[in-house]
Each structure stands twice: as structure tokens, then as C-alpha cells.
């Protein structure tokens, strides 16, 4: 709407990125990240930062990639830089960065509040549903982790992290057969999505 355009409009040099090449590299990274291939996503996010050192979301995504591999010492500087640059992003990007910053630095309650705001502001955006599930699992609140995973599946059945979060919720509630069933449902949509295989391996062990 015109009102929305007027509210969120900003000069290009102050927006996500003014570099088309940086945006292209970032987009390739996002494609790989969406498929669970974080290892190969990282070089594209790094290239995006080289092309535009003020690209807040590229820093944020790189932080997420490293934190997904448990390398929080590597992730933290990127997360801090993203937080410092968050006002250069779009409104959903600012919410994404803020929520990740709090949740990934151990301020889980603040992270949940930020993700809830993100979810309420953009109800069709899948990210807050997915990341709320991760945060609730970290808190050991598996009922809520399961519920948010199921919500994520309803919002976007093709976003496979919803299936992964629901499965972890089931596991935390000692319901492994239901966990396996939801993982296999996700794999029917994308047989190559690595995190679902990882969770199945955890159940097998």
C-alpha cells in the first residue's frame, strides 16, 4: 500500500544493499542455506560482505551459519556487526537481526519477545515461527517447540525447518515415533534436506 511504501521507504544506499553483485552473492547463499547446506552458503555470504561492508543481513546470515555448526566464537563478531548495522536493513530484517542477537547471545527471553513481535508484525513470514521453535527447545519447553514447529508447517509446508523443529519437540516429549513420522513427511517434500537426516540419525542412535 502507499502508506506502507511511505513508512518504510529509504534511499537505496541506506537500504539492504546498493550493490547488485552483493545481492546476487547473498541470494545464492540463501538458496544453499534454505536447503540446509550452510557449509557451502558461508563463502557466498562472505563475498557479499566483501562487496558491501555495510550489508547487515549478510553479516546476520553468516552468524547464523556458524552458530548452526556450534562455532559461536566465530559467529559472535558477525552477529555484533549485524546488530550495529541493523538500521540499514528493511523492517523485517531489523526484526530478524534483533531477535537473533538476543536469542543467540543467551538472552532467550528477550529473543522470544523479539520473535513474537516479528511474528505478529509479519504473520506470513516463516522465519519467526522457525526460530521460536529453536529457542523454546533451548529452554527445554518442548510443548511450545512442538506447537511452533506445527505452526511453521502450516504457514509454509515447504520450509523444512518446521518439520525439524516439530520433530525435536516430539523427541523432547519422548515421542520418537511421531518425530520420525514428521521427519519423513518433510523428506517427501525435499529428500536432500540435511537437517532432517541429522535428526533421524539422532533418533536411530
Image: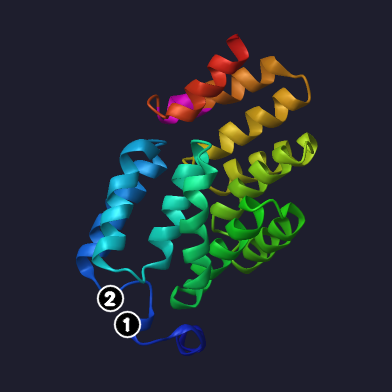
Looking at the image, what colour scheme do you see? rainbow
Please state if 41 lies on the left or on the right of 1 as rendered. left
The reply to whether residue 27 is visible in this rendering is: no
**Residue 199 image point, x, y percent:** 56, 23
At horizontal 60% and vertical 9% (from top left) the residue drawn is: 205
Kind of element beneath mark 1: helix
Examine the structure image and report whether residue 63 is included in the region drawn in magenta.
Answer: no
**Residue 154 image point, x, y percent:** 60, 44
At horizontal 52% and vertical 53% (from top left) the residue drawn is: 76
- The answer to whether 197 is drawn above or below residue 146 in the figure is above
Kind of element beneath mark 2: loop
Q: Quadrant of residue 117?
A: bottom right
**Residue 113 image point, x, y percent:** 73, 61
Dot 1 crowding, Cα within 10 Å, few <14, some 14–19, many 20+:
few
The part of the chain drawn in magenta is 186-190
- The answer to whether 47 is drawn above or below residue 169 in the figure is below
Q: Quadrant of residue 50?
A: bottom left
The reply to whether residue 113 is visible in this rendering is: yes
Examine the structure image and report whether residue 188 is included in the region drawn in magenta.
Answer: yes
Would you name the residue on which mark 2 appears? 18
Furthest-top residue in this view: 205
**Pointers 1 and 2 in contact (C-beta within 8 Å):** yes
Q: Quadrant of residue 122?
A: bottom right
Magenta region's main secondary structure?
helix
Task: Count every numbered label the image shows and give the total.
Answer: 2
Depth check: give the residue in front, 118 or 85: 85
Would you name the residue on which mark 1 appears? 12
Indicate which disc, 1 or 2, sits on the residue closer to the N terminus: 1
Furthest-left residue in this view: 21
Amino acid at each position: 500500500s502507499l502508506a506502507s511504501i511511505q513508512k518504510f521507504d529509504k534511499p537505496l544506499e541506506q537500504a539492504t544493499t546498493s550493490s547488485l553483485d552483493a545481492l546476487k552473492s547473498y541470494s545464492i547463499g540463501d538458496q544453499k542455506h534454505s536447503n540446509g547446506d550452510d557449509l557451502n552458503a558461508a563463502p557466498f555470504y562472505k563475498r557479499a560482505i566483501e562487496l558491501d561492508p555495510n550489508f547487515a543481513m549478510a553479516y546476520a546470515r553468516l552468524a547464523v551459519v556458524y552458530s548452526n555448526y556450534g562455532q559461536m566464537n566465530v559467529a559472535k563478531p558477525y552477529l555484533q556487526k549485524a546488530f550495529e548495522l541493523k538500521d540499514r536493513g528493511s523492517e523485517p530484517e531489523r526484526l530478524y537481526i534483533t531477535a537473533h542477537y538476543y536469542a543467540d547471545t543467551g538472552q532467550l527471553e528477550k529473543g522470544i519477545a523479539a520473535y513474537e513481535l516479528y511474528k505478529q508484525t509479519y504473520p506470513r513470514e516463516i522465519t519467526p515461527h522457525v526460530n521460536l521453535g529453536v529457542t523454546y527447545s533451548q529452554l527445554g519447553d518442548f510443548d511450545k517447540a512442538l506447537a511452533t514447529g506445527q505452526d511453521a508447517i502450516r504457514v509454509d509446508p515447504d520450509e523444512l525447518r518446521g518439520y525439524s523443529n516439530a520433530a525435536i519437540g516430539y523427541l523432547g516429549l519422548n515421542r520418537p515415533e511421531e518425530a520420525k513420522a514428521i521427519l519423513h513427511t518433510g523428506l517427501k517434500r525435499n529428500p536432500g534436506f540435511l537437517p532432517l537426516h541429522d535428526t533421524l540419525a539422532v533418533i536411530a542412535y
